[in-house]
Amino acid sequence: MRTDEDIKRDVEYELKWDPDIDPSDIGVAVKDGAVTLSGFARSFRQRTKAAEDATRVRGVRGVANDVEVRLPLINKRPDPEIVREIIAELKAEVPYAAEDIKAVVRDGHVTLKGEVEWDYQRRRAADTALRVSGVTGVTNEIEIKPKVKPEDLKHKIDDAFKRNAEVDAQHITVEAEGNKVVLRGTVRSWAEREEAERIAWLAPGVMRVDNRITIEY
């Protein structure tokens, strides 16, 4: 069993190994396998990458990311300029939903509001905003409003499983409860289980996926 000291050392090494991160202002603390990251990052992307790096370390049971984003003065931009770029990027990334999404920016922090039909549109809008220079954080308040009935939702996911070569549709059952989807059955690998969940999230109107699929090696 790995000690907290071992995990702390390896997380620090992992942060230094990542060329996309400047770890000089990031602190690492570990207690019972739970990692807490603190300090400052120069972009939201670096903050996110630090947490991703920590989760890769063997023995880590969870990560609390308390790193703050502090942009260098040269990278700070006026809020109106940030908003204009976010609007333009949303039109390119989610063209069918961009008109239904509003971005509010205050001191570089973006709040996204509105309604979309697909979860991937909600997530892609947030990812798009995070890539804009000058953004220090994103609060995603976009809601998912389904336009399909639960029974139609089930059929759409079943059909998607049948089309997918990586998923054995015969061993997975789909239940639709409003905008919640429950997956049951057995698969051959963790990758197949994750692929089944990914497919379910792509269905229109899905707000939650309860993945109860088990793995039989």
Image (spheres, rainbow, N blue to C red):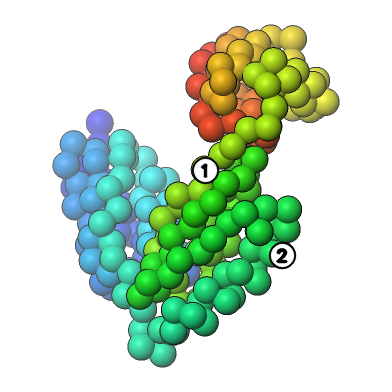
Which is more toward the observer, 102 or 140?
102
**Label 2 close to label 1 by CB (< 8 Å):** no
Residue 28 in the image, given as x and y percentages of width and height: 23, 57
Residue indicated by mark 2:
92
Left or right of residue 14: residue 38: left
Residue 70 in the image, given as x and y percentages of width and height: 31, 75
The 10 Å Cα crowd at callout 1, few under 14, some 14 to 19, many 20 or more, is: some
Q: Is residue 170 visible?
A: yes
Q: Is residue 157 visible?
A: no
Left or right of residue 49: residue 5: left
Residue indicated by mark 1:
143
Residue 34's place in the image compared with 130, above or below, is above
Which is more toward the observer, 114 or 155?
114
Residue 102's place in the image compared with 199, above or below, is below
Q: Residue at x 45, y 66 (%)?
A: 104
Residue 149's place in the image compared with 76, above or below, is above
Cα–Cα span, label 2 and label 1: 20 Å
Residue 109 in the image, given as x and y percentages of width and height: 39, 67
The 10 Å Cα crowd at callout 2, few under 14, some 14 to 19, many 20 or more, is: few
Residue 184 in the image, given as x and y percentages of width and height: 58, 12
Say which element carries label 1: strand
Between discs 2 and 1, the one toward the N terminus? 2
